[in-house]
Amino acid sequence: MVKITGDYYTNRGGRKENEDSCLLLFDKEKGICALVADGLGYHGGGAAASQKAREIIYKSFMGERIERPEEFNIWFQEANQEVLRLQTTEIQMKTTLVVLLIHKHKAMWAHIGDSRLYHFVNGELVEQTFDHSVSQMAVLRGDITESEIRGHVDRNRLLRAIGREDTIKIDTSVATIEEGDWHAFLLCTDGFWEYVLEKEMEKDLRKANGPRDWIKRMVKRIKSRTIFKKNDNNTAVAVICRRD
């Protein structure tokens, strides 16, 4: 039996509007759906794009259960087409998107952009998503290290996003929740992970009394490191699974 708990947090930071969106759904038949999206496109466009992506994923999850990670492509392509329809000449809105599904003993996720999913097993980070950004490409070329992404001049330049092209390419992954293990998943926008290092995520997870406390500990770090009214929107969804 897998016991699942989760919580979420979102804050507009120092911006006038929160263009992030998040979702955490528990359904007895379909399992768990968690989502984070970070909208891009000023004058309300970013918020509209992330909210539209959230709407499409919610509708898709409630309408059907997918069995394989590659099937995420159907959901993401639909979200992409809907965001493209919202675009105008003046507002070319886009959004990142990361989605996690957990059903029985299997976890699957997919993403596009630089909102991340971190996967921990028994308190240790074992996997994280690959940013679709200019900064991540600089890491691959050896120009900067992984840790230097956070302060890189081109960190906000995305190579992939919902609403960027007619057909998008996503990355997917899958994990099995083995008996006796506990898994934790953190989905977050760049305004969140920018201020919390991976080792700190691990440390706070091990000390935390559940998802809410885990997020609370990380938010405390963010608040101690941000300049008032200058930081970005920051959003996170935390899910912890234990299989007895």
Image (cartoon, rainbow, N blue to C red):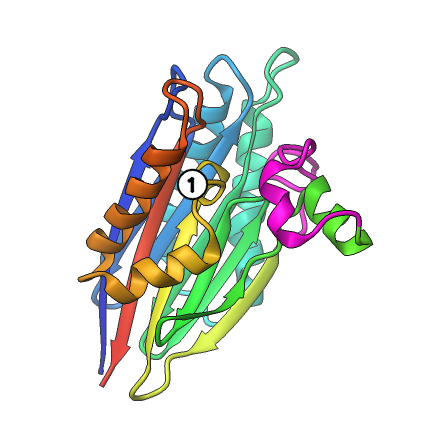
Relative vertical location of residue 59 with respect to residue 82 in this rendering, above or below:
below
Choose top left, top right, bottom left or bottom right for residue 88: top right
Residue 177: x and y in percent read: 37, 80
Does 167 appear in magenta? yes
Relative vertical location of residue 138 with respect to residue 175 in this rendering, above or below:
above
Q: Nearer the viewer, residue 24 or 201?
A: 201
Q: Report whether 5 appears left or right of 226.
A: left
Residue bearing the label numbered 1? 192
Q: Report whether 219 appears left or right of 109.
A: left
State whether residue 237 appears in this view: yes
Relative vertical location of residue 99 with respect to residue 45 in this rendering, above or below:
below
Q: Report whether 86 appears left or right of 242.
A: right
Residue at left offset 50%, top offset 20%: 45
Relative vertical location of residue 114 with respect to residue 230 in this rendering, above or below:
below
Mark 1 is surrounded, within 10 Å at the Cα level, by few (under 14), some (14 to 19) or many (20 or more) other residues, namely many
Q: Nearer the viewer, residue 141 or 48?
A: 141
Residue 11: x and y in percent read: 32, 31
Q: Residue furthest front?
A: 224
Residue at left offset 55%, top offset 67%: 173
Q: Nearer the viewer, residue 41 or 165?
A: 41
Amino acid found under the numbered disc labelled 1: Phe
Q: Report whether 143 appears left or right of 81.
A: right
